[in-house]
Image: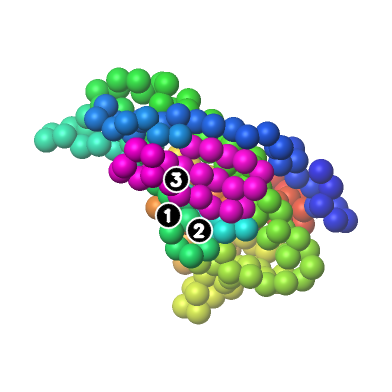
Amino acid sequence: IKLRKSFYFTIMPRPTETLTFTLKSSIMDRHRQLTLTPGYLEFDDNDTVGSTPTRFLVSELAALRYGPKAISGYNFRIGRIYCIDIRSTTGQVIKLRLRSVYRIRLQQLENKYTEIVNALFKYYFYDIVRQYVWSFQDGDSFDLAGLHIAPDGILFDKKVGRISWDFLRTRRYWGYFTVFSDTDQSQYKAFSFVEDWNAEILYTVIELILKHKFPDRKA
C-alpha cells in the first residue's frame, strides 16, 4: 500500500469481516467472547453473564500494550500469563489474560495470544501507525509513548536532549526495544512492550521513518 510519496507499508487493508475469539483466562473463569469488527472492538469483561460487553469504537482506540509475564511460585516460576491491554481515549482499559500454570495448554494459549495481537494490528492499530507516518511526512511533530518525534529528530527529555535522525538507532530484544544515539551512550531509552503503552507502535513508526530516510543503512 503506498502512503503518499515514497512511504510504504507491507500490510493489507483493514478486514471487512467480523472476527471472534473465545477466551478463558483461567480454569476458574468462564468463557468470554472477544469480537473484532471494522467499526468497533467488544469484550465480555463483566462478572455477570448476560451483562452488556465493553465496546470501544474504532475512533475511541488510543493505546495497546502486550506481552507475557511470569507467574511466580515460592521458589520458582510456575506459569505464564499472556497479557493484552487495550485503552480507549477516555482511559478505560480492556484487559485480556490467558494463564498457563505448569505449562498446561501453554502452546495453545500462546498461539491464541499471537493470533489476537496480530488481528488487533490488522483491524485497528496499523491505521494508527499510518496516521503517525502521515503526520511525520507532512512535517508535523507529535508525542508518542513518551517521546517527542519531530522532523529533525527525537527528544527524550530536556536532560537527555534531542537525537538527530542521522544518529538514531534502535535495537529489538525479547520483550523490549531500545532507542539510542550511536554517538552518545547517555542518549538511551528502553521500552517494554508489556509495560509501556504503544511501545510497539512507537517502534514501528521509528523503523518506517528510518527505512525511508536511510534505505541503504544496515540494521
Q: Which residue bears the numbered disc 2?
A: 88
Tell me if mark 3 has few (under 14), some (14-19) or many (20+) residues whose alpha carbon lies within 10 angstroms of its own: some
Residue depicted at x 31% and y 28%: 100
Q: Which residue bears the numbered disc 3?
A: 53
- Picture quarter containing residue 118? top right
Q: Which residue bears the numbered disc 1?
A: 93
Q: Residue furthest bottom?
A: 158
Q: How far apart are marks 2 and 1 (CA)?
A: 6 Å
Q: Distance between the residues labelled 2 and 3?
A: 15 Å
The residue stretch that appears in magenta: 34-58
Residue depicted at x 57% and y 59%: 60
Residue 147 in the image: above or below residue 101 = below
Q: Where is residue 155 in the image (x, y as percent from the top left)?
A: 57, 71
* Residue 44 relative to residue 168: left or right: left
Q: Residues at badges 2 and 1 in contact (C-beta under 8 Å)? A: yes
Q: Residues at badges 1 and 3 in contact (C-beta under 8 Å)? A: no
Q: Position of residue 212 (x, y in %)?
A: 77, 53
